[in-house]
Amino acid sequence: MESILLLAHTEADGSLAKPALEALAAALALGGPLTVGLAGTITQPAADQIAACGAVRFLAVTGDAFGAPRYATDAAAAEALCRAAGCALVIAPGTSRWARALPGVAYRLGGRVDTHATGIAERNNVPAVTRWFYRQRMEAVLTRAQRPWIVLLDSGCMAPWPGTPGTANVEPVSVDAPATRTTVSGYRAPQSGEQTIRPDARLLFVAGAGWTKKQADGAVHAADAEQLILGFLQKSHASLGGSKSLVDLSGEGEAVLRFMTHMNQIGQTGSTPRHPKGLSTCCHGEEPHAVGWRFIDQRRAVNLDANCGWARGKADVLYVADAFEVMRHLNALL
């Protein structure tokens, strides 16, 4: 197997996040000689975190200029690490930070890059990347002759490296930070109770347009729907998904769930999340929406229609019940 470089950026405290540990597990599974390249404000804690992984070298670009996500500095750090390592295969977590910078790095190095990979393994003594096309409907296996080959692995596709920390000998790589026109003044994030997208949540809760339609009494209860859904998300710490029909209602003058945006959309024209469990409510469950559930391990749905799409083999368990009543009971239990 060819030489491998694991490329990772550190968090604010100098550690490695879950996507980086997943990429490390994928790199180790290939079996080639491994070099670790780190970039960030501080890198020694990250190197110590994975010191027992068996890497032959630990390289690091360290400094305040490389702590913030910025194309110019990220690309400079990644390019320097790739040149110092001299590896044919570069594996990196598919974070927004690397996805923005590494395609440009591949061009600078005269190599190639593949993003959104869901796996990498050895086939006929060469590395082969697995990824999906056409909104997760077709799976392809790719190999490339060009080197270096940079591969960005999507998070959630494999278990993180479970090793224990130690002490690593880090070789510094000198990089002159390029001139920048931006200054990072800080981060703004929603309160934990207001956050609805949680990629690491164990449960994905999906709401459909039925929440905003007329109910059994002939009235729309969008306000009650908001309270029930938000209450469940706060108690269960689930991640929220929405069908296209629901997130599009805001442009049609219909009653809407005010916290639902196109960022929550899953399915054929949305995201394809990966969670251990999923619960769908008031959704029809036809193919465009079910595509978004392709990688959910256990799928359950709540719908008053026993002949809905979820009942025709899309869900492991279908509850024929009123979603409002079900969620009131769930919130009371929680």
Image: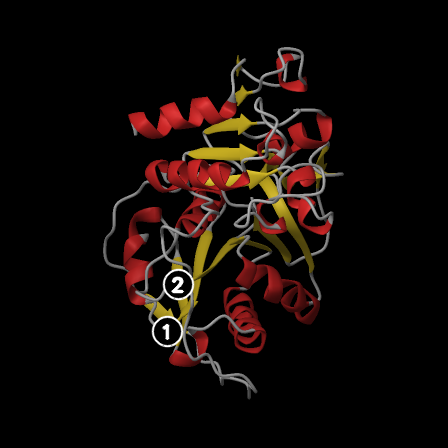
Q: Examine the rendered structure and indicate whether residue 17 appears above or below residue 309.
A: below
Q: Which residue is mark 2?
A: 10
Disc 1 crowd, CA 10 A, few/some/many (<14, 14-19, 20+): many
Q: Circle 1 sits in a helix, a strand or a loop, which is it?
A: loop
Amino acid at circle 1:
Thr
Quick one: quadrant of the C terminus?
top left
Q: Position of residue 168 (x, y in %)?
A: 28, 60
Q: Is residue 113 left or right of residue 28?
A: right
Colouring chosen for the image of the structure? secondary structure
Q: How far is the residue under mark 2 from the one under mark 1?
A: 8 Å
Amino acid at circle 2:
Thr
Q: Position of residue 233 (x, y in %)?
A: 40, 40
Q: Examine the rendered structure and indicate whether residue 23 appears above or below residue 158.
A: below
Q: Where residue 82 is drawn, which disc sits there?
A: none
Q: Tell me, yes or no, whether the two marked residues, 2 and 1, touch with CB atoms within 8 Å.
A: yes
Q: Which residue is mark 1?
A: 41
